[in-house]
Image: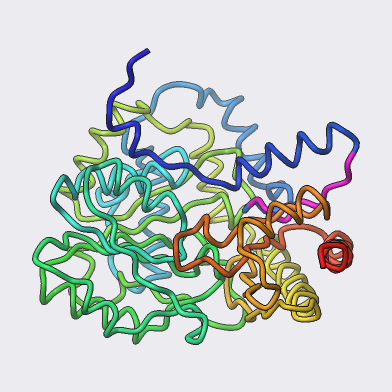
Amino acid sequence: MKFAKRMERLGTESAFEVLARAKALEATGKQVVHLQIGEPDFDTPPNITEAAIKALKEGFTHYGPSAGLLQFRETIAEYVSKTRNIEVKPEEVVVTPGGKPVIYFALTQLVEKGDEVIYPNPGYPIYESVINFCGATPVPLPLLEKKDFRFEIEDLKKLITPKTKAIVINSPQNPTGGIFEMSDLEAIADLCKKHDIYVFADEIYSRIIYGGKHYSILSVPGMKERTIMMDGFSKTYAMTGWRLGYGVMPKDVADLMSKMMTNVNSCTATFVQIAGIEGLKGDQSYVDKMVAEFKKRRDIIVEGMNSIDGFRCKVPTGAFYVFPNIEGTGYGSKELADYLLNEGGVACLSGAAFGKYGEGFLRFSYANSVENIKKAIDMIKTALKKKK
């Protein structure tokens, strides 16, 4: 079959590729500790599951509006207004099956051939993939280990050209666990207003923070009009398989995104949206317990990583990943990641899978038990001794 040329520009997400390889190894009898996938190892809170079951029994099994059920968009608008300190209306909300459609729909609307889009690097690989797919030019903004994976404002200024159409930001970050401070967002906002640039803000990890505070660029005066913010339920409520996300954006953008939903998905499953209402309005203690457990695991895995010869690991302040520097081992990122999987039995991701500035790092998810995290540290040490 002859495929369209655009398909050559479409990237992928290596976490799923490594998961498949790890499963294949397990099928041969090899033990593998899974620290590669960005998925909470907790079940969805029972109150949310029960709300979905109740909704199914009540007949929420039919089409709904492409933008999402009004009662759910009202709930999201109320939640975002409260958490981001701005006024959001239901007509500025679009509900999607997962967060990824918001990334795709937003960038498809905003950019085209000849445009440039600045994005965080190392960063979630789907940003670069979609920018390329749209025919625009991805421009990587280095996130620096020495700045706890924040950026230098001068570096950002140098990247802006008359062709710059949008900037993608992600905080808390995948893969580094870093968080932008309000001063970072204000600097980005000043440049966007000066150069008429739009922002796509990925805030999917906004509730998974350890001791710090989540800041949203939506809160910066003058930025709501030029920002598309994405959030969702996969990480906060352990609902990865439910596929439930949303975007908050100016109404004219929302109208177009709703039209795209009509063309691509028709709508998001209605009973899942009813469960989402319970997620935002119901008891939050389950989420608090999950984040507390992640913090406990974070402390253990950081200490463990720093005990490995050649590893140097920052303490992440959000999400559930560590991004240790492994240059001291003398091995490249992909070489070491492949070796740790095939010989060591530990599945992780090469930092280079998140962009060129991720070379020299590995990403480990600590969405796994303390027992398995400790086991993985020992397995890495054993494997590295064999490799020398």
Q: Which residues are magenta?
A: 30-37
Q: Main secondary structure of the magenta part?
A: loop
**Residue 40 left/right relative to 371:** left
For the N terminus, the image quarter is: top left
Residue 388, compared with residue 204, is above or below; it is: below
The residue that appears at 35% across and 34% down in the rendered structure is 8
Magenta residue check for 206? no
Task: Name the foreground residue: 235 vs 107.
Answer: 107
Residue 366 x %, y %: 72, 63
**Residue 76 left/right relative to 323:** left
The residue that appears at 33% across and 16% down in the rendered structure is 2
Residue 37, compared with residue 317, is above or below; it is: above
The residue that appears at 63% across and 75% down in the rendered structure is 327
**Residue 142 left/right relative to 133:** right
Residue 386 x %, y %: 87, 63
Where, by quadrant of the figure, is residue 275 drawn? top right
Task: Name the foreground residue: 95 vs 145.
Answer: 145
Residue 311, compared with residue 287, is above or below; it is: below
Where, by quadrant of the figure, is residue 81 drawn? bottom left
Count the marks: how many? 0
